[in-house]
Image (cartoon, rainbow, N blue to C red):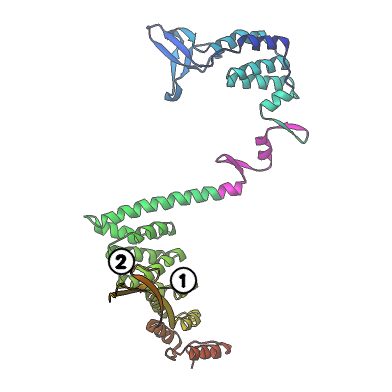
């Protein structure tokens, strides 16, 4: 229930239609005018006028330069007229606060709400209007309760100090990563001009792991093999697992063999189970070319964990599309399914047919020989028998006869 006095009710009825545009017009002795919000109205003695000019900031005028102040806000003018008629009691201050609420005088409303609470600490309506609620028998705001529980306000939500610390750390890391991207892009552009030597030095001097995403993204779109080699060297210098994963992708996907082999050279110097696992996964590729590239990499890394997957990849089956011309035509084309063999230009009468082919993968056999010192050619069963016999030994040496 909202408690109001008969006097306050009469005030509400008489003054409700008032406009809410808020500003004053300061008429200057010089004849000019300034329109804005009077901020220091209650300052005594009044020697100056502090005026808020909307979003443009504020100005200060000496009182001697102002001839008169004209209210352009009827609600404020009426508020100042009726304010003395409200007694300094909790009920009357609450009533005046309600009048201010209806006329969008927010600062004045809060002032009277706080006065009502000061006069009557258990004034329910004023407390609730100020955002208070009862917690364990005491009036407190939700902010006060959360603060007492150890939470802090961060980006519009209550969080633990630990969460804020982690989020701040992540924010700073993201800023650093973005800055690295800008720097790397600029230095890459230098490679094409007079500052090529400086750009190369800057790129090769990078040792911050936060630069890896920028190096990786720009490397992926780099068309010049020589520039890619610089990025690869920079990533190798950083040497984090994330950087080595980028080199592993380069060893598989770069179109230039020299670049792929350079990636492998760096990977050999810093072998890791994660990189070996990446190449092992590529042995299951639908593209026979990628199977053999992965085998070359595993042979270079000489990882014993690759032996069993390599045995399985000695002979692989791949699907192809066979397209033959209709109406007795003799033209045909084959390409792997899912690849970019392209069907452009084929007539409506051409009907694709899926065929399967088995491949004996020389690169896979070479990798097995390199890792184990054995050679059972493409006899997968013989390889498996040998591997099982090695596993029965306590000290497994893949090169032992």
How many circles with numbers are drawn on the protein?
A: 2
What residue is shown at x 44% (from left), y 17% (from top)?
60
Of labels 2 and 1, the one closer to you: 2
x and y, in percent, of residue 101 in the image? 62, 20
What residue is shown at x 38% (from left), y 82% (from top)?
363
x and y, in percent, of residue 215 in the image? 37, 59
Q: Could you say whether the residue bearing mark 1 is in a helix, strand or loop? A: helix
Q: Nearer the viewer, residue 169 or 35?
A: 35
Query: On the rendered structure, is 15 left or right of 338?
Result: right
x and y, in percent, of residue 34 in the image? 42, 13
Q: Nearer the viewer, residue 371 or 184?
A: 371
Query: On the rendered structure, is 326 left or right of 26?
Result: left
Q: Name the residue under label 1.
A: 278
Q: Mark 2 points at which residue?
A: 347
Query: On the rendered structure, is 325 left or right of 89?
Result: left
Q: What stretch is highlighted in magenta?
A: 137-165
Q: Is residue 159 found inside the magenta-colored segment of the image?
A: yes
Crowd around label 1: few <14 · some 14–19 · many ≥20 (10 Å): some
Q: Is residue 140 found inside the magenta-colored segment of the image?
A: yes
């Amino acid at each position: 229930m909202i408690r109001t006095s008969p006097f306050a009710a009469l005030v509400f009825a008489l003054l409700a239609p008032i406009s809410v545009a808020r500003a004053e017009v300061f008429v200057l002795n010089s004849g000019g005018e300034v329109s804005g919000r009077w901020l220091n109205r209650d300052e005594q003695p009044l020697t100056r006028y502090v005026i808020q000019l909307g979003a443009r900031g504020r100005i200060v005028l000496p009182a001697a330069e102002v001839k008169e102040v004209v209210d352009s806000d009827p609600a404020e003018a009426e508020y100042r007229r009726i304010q003395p008629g409200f007694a300094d009691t909790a009920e009357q201050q609450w009533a005046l606060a309600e009048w201010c609420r209806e006329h969008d005088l927010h600062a004045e409303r809060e002032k009277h709400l706080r006065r009502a609470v000061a006069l009557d600490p258990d004034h329910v309506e004023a407390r609730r209007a100020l955002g208070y609620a009862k917690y364990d028998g005491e009036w407190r705001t939700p902010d006060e309760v959360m603060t007492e529980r150890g939470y802090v306000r961060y980006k519009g939500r209550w969080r633990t100090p630990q969460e804020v610390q982690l989020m701040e750390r992540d924010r700073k890391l993201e800023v650093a990563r973005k800055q690295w991207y800008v720097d790397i892009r600029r230095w890459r552009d230098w490679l094409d001009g007079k500052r090529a030597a400086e750009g190369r030095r800057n790129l090769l001097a990078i040792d911050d792991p936060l630069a890896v995403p920028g190096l990786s993204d720009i490397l992926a779109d780099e068309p010049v093999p020589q520039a890619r080699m610089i990025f690869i060297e920079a990533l190798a210098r950083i040497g984090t697992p994330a950087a080595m994963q980028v080199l592993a992708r380069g060893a598989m996907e770069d179109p230039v063999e020299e670049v792929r082999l350079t990636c492998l050279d760096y990977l050999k110097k810093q072998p890791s189970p994660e990189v070996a696992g990446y190449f092992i996964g590529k042995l299951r590729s639908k593209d026979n070319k990628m199977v053999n590239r992965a085998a070359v990499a595993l042979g270079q890394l000489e990882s014993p964990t690759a032996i069993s997957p390599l045995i399985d990849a000695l002979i692989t089956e791949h699907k192809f599309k066979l397209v033959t011309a209709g109406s007795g035509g003799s033209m045909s084309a084959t390409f792997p399914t899912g690849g970019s063999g392209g069907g452009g230009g084929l007539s409506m009468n051409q009907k694709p047919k899926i065929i399967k082919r088995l491949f004996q993968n020389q690169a896979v056999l070479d990798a097995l020989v390199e890792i184990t010192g054995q050679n059972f050619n493409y006899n997968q069963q013989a390889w498996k028998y040998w591997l099982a016999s090695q596993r029965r030994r306590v000290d497994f040496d893949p090169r032992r006869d």
